[in-house]
Amino acid sequence: MSKTTDELYMEHLDEMFDINSPFTDEAVERILNRMLLFLPNGGKLYKYRSMEGTAFDNAFDSLKNGYLWLPKAEDLNDDEDTVLYYDPLKSVEEIKEYIFSHPYEFMGAVISSPERKFKIGKTKKDEFEIKCVCNCFDRTTGVLDEHKAILRMVKNGIPKEKAVKQLNILKAFIESYPKDNIKAIESLAEMHLSYNKRIRSQSYIYSLSEDYDNDQLWAYYANSNNGFCIEYDFNKCRELPVDTKRNLISLYKVKYKEAEEYSFKPLIEWFFDGRDSTKYSEENKKILNQLITKKIGWQQEKEWRLFLSDTENKLFADIVSGIIIDERTLGSENSNMLISLSEARGWDIRIRRKNKVGTKHIYEALNTEVQ
């Protein structure tokens, strides 16, 4: 039995949001082929643009030179786009409380961190002993295996009697470490407060719509109906270099729902739990799903978006297949430029007109008489 478009899309999300996905050249081709099966309109999506000013100049340049201009998320018109929703004060307290109640996990993560730039203890021997104790803490039961820790210290040359006394000293040090370093813990907890700012500055978005005939989008994004709409055909991706395809498969359908409060606790657990890639991959999927979610008030846009990270604004990908121009702009210099370029490139040209009684818009090939 063949899969539904929804099933294919969920496969797409699972693979694209999996940090362990290899994205080899062969995988990119396979993902693209699957994407063309679940995209609406046989693979065609739309973007509304103004016919005036710098907005037109920029759009025309991108059409003429065959690229997509991806603004950063922080430059989008919705200042709540590409964010996680969380209560900062509640989140800071949640992280602090978790660290205070898991001192062995915390110390183990800190002392094993390759990014650590400070000493714990006075000597390397101190650090080794602390690490021995942390490695003997059972994360499942929450109990320190003291016998095992003592044996490890004895094997390192410490007499057993001294090892027993040293273990008590080390336990007291580890268990008090978080509260003795409260400022450092608070600083760690508060670092995530700038998470949304960082993610919005690193995310590049190209927004598209399923529809070319959405009157609200013509009014909002096409300069109050004095604009045009670009048709992008993702079937044309087949002819592009594989590195370009690798970017273009990062295409997602925006979800519309009320915000759910996010908790950073799973990421802290991951940090404490040896940075297991499987656990992080699952949490990464949750985060990325939230980042492609918008509030219900935007649902009329039926948005699909290219969502890239740490890239450049220009993505050269000539996948335009058509132009739709509102009749109010016909005869203008910019409209004539757009029509000439479309004819030269072999793009489909349609005109958006009002029907004879002015009750709806119709879309007809260029030079077709108004009905």
Image: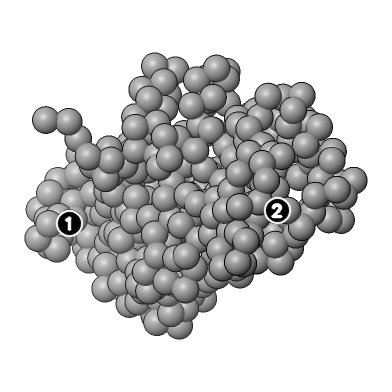
Give above or below for 27 relative to 336.
above
Q: Which mark is residue 326?
A: 2
Depth check, front residue: 245 or 51: 51
Residue 316 point in image, percent of width and height: 67, 30
Q: Secondary structure at mark 2?
A: strand
Question: Looking at the image, which residue is at 42% across and 50% down?
Answer: 253
Task: Quickly name the residue at label 1.
Answer: 139
Mark 1 or mark 2, earlier in chain: 1
Question: Can residue 16 be seen here?
Answer: no
* Mark-to-mark CA distance, 1 and 2: 64 Å
Depth check, front residue: 257 or 359: 359
Q: Which mark is residue 226?
A: none
Q: Point out the image quarter for the N terminus.
A: top left
Question: Looking at the image, which residue is at 49% across and 68% down?
Answer: 298
Question: Looking at the image, which residue is at 42% across and 34% down?
Answer: 42
Type of amino acid under label 2: Asp
Question: Looking at the image, which residue is at 87% across and 56% down?
Answer: 53
Side of 143 relative to 128 (left or right): left
Type of amino acid under label 1: Arg
Residue 368 point in image, percent of width and height: 66, 41
Give above or below for 248 relative to 166.
above
Q: Secondary structure at mark 1?
A: loop
Depth check, front residue: 194 or 47: 47
Q: Residues within 10 Å of mark 1 (few under 14, many from 20)?
A: some
Residue 50 point in image, percent of width and height: 75, 55
Question: Can residue 35 be seen here?
Answer: yes
Depth check, front residue: 228 or 77: 228
Side of 355 relative to 158 (left or right): right
Residue 144 point in image, percent of width and height: 15, 60
In which quadrant of the rendered view does residue 286 lie? bottom left
**Of all residues shown, which one is farthest toward the right?**
333
